[in-house]
Amino acid sequence: MLETLALMGHGFVNAMSLSNLLFMAGGTAIGIIIGCLPGLSAAMGVALLLPMTFTMAPETGLIVLGAIYCGAIFGGSISAILIHTPGTPASAATAIEGYQLTLQGKAGKALAVACFSSFCGGLLSCISLYFFAPLLAQLAMKFGSPEYFWLSIFGLTIIAGVASKSLLKGLISGALGLLLSTIGMDPMEGAQRFMFGQASLYEGINTTCALIGLFSMSQVLILAEKKIKQRAKAAKFSDKITLSGKEIKRITPTILRSWVIGNLIGILPGAGASIACFLGYNTSRQFSHHKEEFGKGSIEGVAGSEAANNAVTGGSLIPMLTLGIPGESVTAVLMGGLIIQGLQPGPELFTRYAPMTYTFFAGFVLVQFFMLGIGLLGCRGFAQISRLSDAILIPSVAVLCVVGSFAIHKNFFDVVIMMIFGVLGYLVRKFDLNPAAIVLALILGPIGENGLRRSLRLSGGSPAILFSTPLCWVLIALCVFGVCSPIFMNRMEKKAVEDAGGDIPNETGDDPVRTSD
Amino acid sequence: MKKTDIGVVGFMYAVCAFFFLMSRDLKKGARIYPLCIIAILFLLTTGYVVEMLFAAKKNGVTSGIPEIFEGFQPKQFFIVLGMLIAYLAGMYFVGFYLATIVLMAASLLYLRVPKWQILISTIVIIGLVYGAFTMFLGVKLPVGLLFK
C-alpha cells in the first residue's frame, strides 16, 4: 500500500517536469483540434502522431498520446455544439442539446458545460485507472503460455465481434490480420516466412506503418472520394464561457452517474465512447428534474453525454495496459505506441516498469486540467479551426502519413507499406470489414503464436495443455462471450440511440471502426 | 445479400490460396501456425458464403454498389490517388521537401482552394514537418536520387 502511494507520488513529481507539462499542453491542444475537425477521428490522430513519440522517454510518449486521446474526445463537442456536426462519434449525443443551446444564444454556456463535464468525467475515470489496473495486473501475473494464447484469441474475438457490422466479417478481418502477422521471421525457429525477398520484412510488417495506413491514409482516401463541401459557419456567440455555482450543483449528479456509466463502458472491451455518450445522455434525461428542457437545450443533456464519453478514456486503458486487450480502436493504436517503446502490456508494467506506468497515470490526471484550461480559453479559436475544409486536410494529412511512416526506420519501404495498408484500409472500410481487428491481429498474432508454440513445446506437442488450468477455461468462456457480445452491444446501442431521439447529425469524425455511429 | 460481398469473399479465398501456395516452401515447424490461420480464414469465409446464401434466399440480392459508393466522385478520387502515388515517386527522385511543395500546390489547386490558403497551408505543413521531424526528431528526410 505504502509502496503504491510512493509510486503515485513519484509519478506526479516526474509528470510535472517542465518538458512533460509542455508536451501535455501541446498534445491536448492537438487532440482538441483533431477532435473538433469532423473529417478526422481520435484513432486517426493518435496513429498519425505516433511516430513523433519515438524519441521521447516512454512515459512522455504515452502522456502525449493520452493527451491527444482525451483532447480529441472532448474536441468533438466543440463542432457538435457550434456547427451541429460532431467532430467524433463520441459527441453525437452532445449535438442534440448543445446545438439547441447555441440557437438560443447560449453557446458559451454549452461549451462551458461540455468542458467542465469532460474534465470531471476524465478526472474521475483516473480513479478507476489507479484502483483497478494494479488489481487486474496481479491476476495477469498468473498467466503462462497457454493463458497468453487464449488471451490473444479473446482480444481478437471481442474487437472483431463488437466493432463490426457483421460478426463473421469482423472475425475474417481478424484472421486476415493474423495471417499478415506471420510475415517475417518465424519466432521459434528463425525461418523466413512470406518475405518476398525483402530484408525490410525480416521483423514482420511494421505495426506503426500499418496503423498509419489503416487509420490515417485510408481516411485521406475516404475524404478524397466525397464532394468537397464548405462547412457551416460556426455560430458566433457573445455569452461568457462560464458556469455559475447553481449550474455546477445542478449538473453534478449527472456527471457522477455518467462517470460510472462511462467507466464501466470503457473497462468493457469492445464498447466505446460512442455508446457511452448516448447512455450518459439517456440516463441524464431519466433522472432529470427538468425533463421538459430535453430536446430544447438542456445543460444536463450536454453534461451527461460529455462526462460519459470522457469517463471512457481512463477505463479503456485498464484492459489495454494490464491484459493487452484494447477496448476500442484508439486504445488499439495506443497499445501500438506502447509496443513501439519496447514495452509489453501486462503485469511487468506494474512491477519492473511501475515508475514509468505511474508517471503516465499522473500525466493522464494532469492532462484533464490542461483540457479544462485549453478548452475554456481556446473554444472560440477551435471553433474556427473546425471549419477547415476537407480539401486542405487531404494533402496535409497525406504528407504527415508519409513523413511519419518514413521517420520510424528512415526507410522508404515503410512508406510503401503504409500506402499499401492505406489502400487496404480504404477497401476494408468500404466493404464493412474491420481495420481495428486487422491492427489488433498484427499486434496479438505474434503473442498468440508464441503462447501456442511454447505451450505445445512444453507439453511435447499435446494440445491438452491449452485446457489444463482453470484460468484457461475462464479465458475460453470469455472468448465465447466475445463472440456472443455483439448481440447485446448492438441492442444496447440501438436502444440508447432510439431513446435519445432528437435530431442526430449524420456527419461525424467518421471513426474507422464504427462508421455507422 | 450484396453482390459486392462476392468480391470480398473472392479476395479472401485468393489470399488463402496465395498464402497456402507460398507456405509449401516453408520448413515444417514454421508452416504449422500459418496453415492453421489459413484454415481458419478459409472456414470463416465459407461461413460467410453460407450466411450470404441464406440472406439471398430471405431478402433477395442487391447490388450493394450504390450504398458503398454513394456520393463517390471517381474523377476526384483517382486524380488525388494518382497524385499521392506520384508524390511517393517524386519524393524518391527529387526529395521530400520539393515533392511536398508540388503535392500541396497541385492538389489544393485541383481541389479549388483559394490561392492564399494554398500558400498558408503549404508553409504551415512544411514548417511543421521541418520543426517536428527534422529539428526535433532529427530525421533526415529523403533528399532524392537527383540531389544525392
Image (spheres, rainbow, N blue to C red):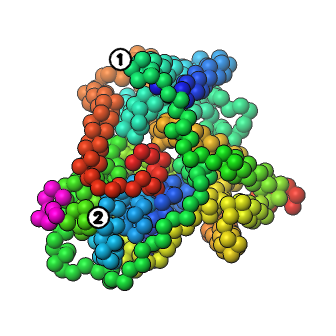
Q: Position of residue A417 (x, y in %)?
A: 66, 43
Describe the element under mark 2 as helix, strand or loop.
Answer: helix
* A117 lies above or below A336: below
Q: Which residues fall within the magenta stretch?
A: A285-292
How many marks can you see?
Answer: 2
Amino acid of disc 2: Glu
- The quarter holding residue A158 reads top left
| Residue A236 appears left or right of B110 | left
Q: Which mark is residue A97?
A: 2
Query: Could you tell me how far apart the alpha carbons at marks 2 and 1 are, in whole angstroms?
Result: 56 Å
Q: Earlier in the sequence, mark 2 or mark 1?
A: 2
Q: Nearer the viewer, residue A213 or B38?
A: A213
Quadrant of the rendering where the C terminus of chain B is positioned? bottom right
Q: Disc 1 designates what residue?
A: A464
Which residue is rendered at x = 26% and y = 53% of the image?
A: A500
Q: Is residue A126 visible?
A: no
Label 1 neighbourhood size at 10 Å, few (<14), some (14-19), many (20+)?
few
Q: Is residue A458 magenta?
A: no
Q: Marks 2 and 1: same chain? A: yes
| Residues tagged 2 and 1 counted as in contact (Cβ below 8 A) | no
Q: Is residue A286 magenta?
A: yes
Which residue is rendered at x = 25% and y = 27% of the image?
A: A470
Chain letter, disc 2 residue:
A
Which residue is rendered at x = 16% and y = 78% of the image?
A: A246
Q: Nearer the viewer, residue A379 or A420?
A: A379
Q: Position of residue A134 (x, y in %)?
A: 28, 51
